[in-house]
Amino acid sequence: MKLGGSLLTDKNKPFSIREEVVKSAVDQIIEANEKLIIIHGGGSFGHPLAKEYSVSKGLDKSIPNQIYGVAETHQSMNKFNTYLINQFLEKKYPVLSIQTSSVFIKDSDTISTKSLDVIETALDLGIMPILYGDIILDKQGSFSIISGDQIILELCQNLTKYYVSKVVFAMESDGLYIVDEDNKAKCNLVTECYSNELDNLNLADLGQKIDVTGGIKGKLSFIRTICKSRIPVQLINGLIEGYIHKSLTNQNLNCTNILINA
């Protein structure tokens, strides 16, 4: 399950946490008590710093203090992750922070996933791993950002011991919206579609906050690839009480379900 950064934080206010939203999400996840990997986005902790120092674009010596900015971006995400971890531990629920930048490393365009056994071993022990969008170092002498969506894709493609039954994106909207062909001023929720139909959707522009990892169109690119691994995807509104729990326990809800083609 991906807990979106814009769901858990106010992206318009740096280093802000929506405490009630986080508390509700944590309570629902604990109540569902499924074998689960959580990934959370950067929100107002990661994106402003990453943008300020152009971290996603890699090493650029013309940017003042960029290397310091890389370290600061990482530490900011650590703080956010620690807050989330503590919410679970205070309720005696076993979770483990997995530092993304220590598990993944790039070599040019290739991401190494040789350390994923730590995640699977945690699951074996009944511990829920929690990863997060982070910086990623590159063996070629640079760096960039690894988004929560990218992390999910790498896990779907490279976990060997566990089969991923579905991927859930908890966001602050009900899912994907398309423009109403009869009334261009309206938009309609896509409740169900097949992965091979995603390219043909006339998506409505609902407005996007600062996001250095690509926004909804970038997310769709990852979703298409996730579906190639025969894994269905669900986009849900994490602000609606009970929706996270209902999704994890496979109950019906008003959202976008992306199905696998036969």
Image (tube, rainbow, N blue to C red):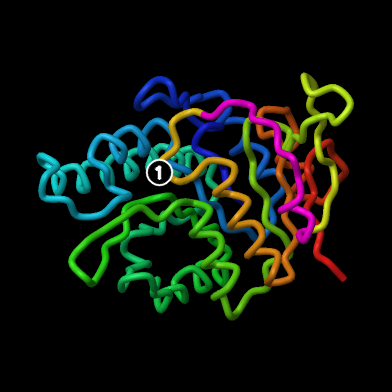
Along the line of sight, the residue nearer the viewer: 15 or 177: 177
Q: Position of residue 253 (x, y in %)?
A: 84, 39
Q: Neighbour class for label 1 at 10 Å: few (<14), some, many (≥20)? A: many
- Residue 225 shown left or right of residue 249 in the figure: left
Seen at 43% across and 40% down, the residue is 86
- Residue 210 shown left or right of residue 162 in the figure: left
SS under mark 1: helix
Q: Position of residue 22 (x, y in %)?
A: 54, 32
Question: Which amino acid type is shown beneath numbered disc 1?
Answer: Asn
Seen at 39% across and 75% down, the residue is 112
Q: Which residues are magenta?
A: 195-208
Q: Position of residue 219 (x, y in %)?
A: 58, 49
Seen at 27% across and 62% down, the residue is 137
Seen at 62% across and 36% down, the residue is 171
Along the line of sight, the residue nearer the viewer: 160 or 232: 232
Along the line of sight, the residue nearer the viewer: 152 or 246: 152
Whether 131 is drawn above or below 158: the answer is above
Residue at numbered disc 1: 81
Question: Magenta stretch containing residue 146, yes or no?
Answer: no
How many numbered discs sit on the rendered protein? 1
Q: Position of residue 222 (x, y in %)?
A: 59, 57
Along the line of sight, the residue nearer the viewer: 65 or 160: 65
Quadrant into which the C terminus falls: bottom right
